[in-house]
Amino acid sequence: MADLFTQALSPQVINAAWKHLRTEKTVWRPGLNRWDMENDLVLHILTLVDELRSGRYRPAPLRQFTITKGDGKQRVLSALSLRDKLAQRAVLTVLEPIGEQLFCNDSYGYRAGRSIEMAFYRAKERIVCGLPWLVDADIRSFFDTIP
């Protein structure tokens, strides 16, 4: 496990994670926007890596805002700071290839390189092969129930 964490904090992975996120418009952390952070980009990223490595890292409070859903109801969303997204993206970069080897090949939700169209065509293939059952499981408003 320590080896995976070391990989996640390597300059190559941190750089790839930053490239993935650098166009995001969210704040680096409360009180410091992304554009001001970029004036001292290396310092801020190295500080984050040091905090992660030393165990001093603490995620920032989530930024919350409300949106109106299609049915007119309100939904509260929570957003990570860019700093926290960078930490998560670095870990994801290392763990995702490991997880992909374990996931069911017919699973399409929230997976890189997979789409709703691919899921649709896979379902069609299954029907043609004589497997007419499709199970779609979703827990209504699940994320609204997490404190």
Image (cartoon, rainbow, N blue to C red):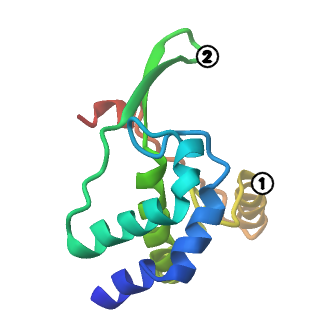
Which residue is at a point 69% across and 63% down the rendered structure image?
Answer: 114
Q: Nearer the viewer, residue 33 or 85?
A: 33
Q: Quadrant of residue 126?
A: bottom right
Which image quarter is the C terminus in?
top left
Q: Which element is circle 2 on? A: loop
Q: Quadrant of residue 22?
A: bottom right
Pointer 1 residue: 117
Horizontal and vertical percent position of residue 8: 43, 78
Q: Which element is circle 1 on? A: helix
The answer to whether residue 5 is visible is yes
Kindly give the residue lying farthest to the bottom in the view shown. Answer: 3
Which image quarter is the N terminus in?
bottom left
- Disc 2 and disc 1 in contact, CB within 8 angstroms: no
Alpha carbon distance from label 2 to label 1: 23 Å
**Which dot, 2 or 1, sits closer to the camera?**
2
Horizontal and vertical percent position of residue 101: 52, 83
Pointer 2 residue: 70
Give the total number of marks visible in the rendering. Answer: 2
| Three-letter residue code for mark 2 | Gly
